[in-house]
Amino acid sequence: MLSKPLLPLVITTGLLDSFNPCAIAILLIFIGLLLTLRRNRKIVILMCLSYIASVYITYFLIGLGILRVMHIFSIPHIMIRIGAAIVIIVGLINLKDFFFPNLPISTRISVGSRQIISKYTFKATIPAAAFVGLLVGIFEFPCSGAIYLAVLGLISAKTTFLKGISYLLLYNLMFILPLIIIFLFATNRLVVEKMLNFEEGHQRLMRLIMAVIMLGLGFSMLIWFV
């Protein structure tokens, strides 16, 4: 059985972590590119599913490794504190990105990492889609993994390792849920273009919303869960 107090927190934080501009933008670019190239529907579906599955598996395996280390060394409460502190710091950086977007410190993926991702995105093959999902999962973790780290600390503190895997599977399902929803609705080029324009036009607002939520989450964890 999953713990009732922990369950809503895992679902909520997984969804919060899922509003990941890079992962969403790459999926939209994939779909738009494939529609432009007039690839058949089966190829589009397989590439998108390959990408989403790869993001899921990569993020899950990263979390599984961290969770195992926490249980081996019995350091969940330390990791909750560290994770909460990182969530607060990332929240402040997102706040900076809203008010002072040109200052150097940012939670965005580095230019070099984006270039590597773009290189494989435009290959437009199923193995390339899976590899891009792997890269997005790895490159996004340093930027968006603060919430993940704090939640892993909570899971480690409140459950056994085996039960923690159930929470981890659920968290990562929430993490890819927006990708699945976008994939289901983005069936034509016009819809994809509108989604891309919306994502590009509201990046600063999304960072402000993320900043407020992350600051609230970080301080809540320090007050109620440590």
Image: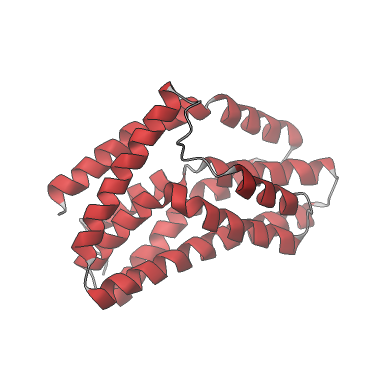
Q: Quadrant of the C terminus?
A: bottom left
Q: How many marks?
A: 0
User: Which residue is at a point 16% across and 53% down the rendered structure image?
Assistant: 225
Q: How is the image coloured?
A: secondary structure
Quarter of the image with the N terminus is: bottom left
Q: In this view, does 173 lie to the left or right of 22?
A: left
Tell me where residue 32 sits by quadrant. top right
Is 62 or 100 nearer to us in this picture?
100
Q: Residue at x 29, y 53 (%)?
A: 83
User: Whole-percent x and y of residue 38?
Assistant: 86, 45
The image shows residue 26, relative to residue 6, as above or below, that is above
Q: Which residue in the rendered view is the most extreme toward the front?
A: 104
Query: Is residue 177 at all visible to an observer of this figure?
Result: yes
Answer above or below: position of 211 versus 73: above
Question: Between residues 188 and 122, which one lies in front from this camera angle?
Answer: 122
Q: Can residue 209 be seen in this view?
A: no
Residue 205: where, in percent of width, then height?
46, 25
User: Residue at position x 78%, y 53% from top?
Assistant: 124
Residue 196: x and y in percent read 64, 33
Q: Is residue 109 left or right of residue 122?
A: left
Where residue 195 sits, quadrant-wise, is top right
Q: Which of 50 and 22 is in front in this view?
A: 22
Q: Picture coordinates of residue 56 (x, y %)?
A: 52, 60
User: Does residue 100 sit above or below 167 in this rendering?
Assistant: above
User: What residue occupies the far top of the structure in this picture?
Assistant: 99
Residue reaching furthest right? Answer: 38
Q: Is residue 135 left or right of residue 102?
A: right
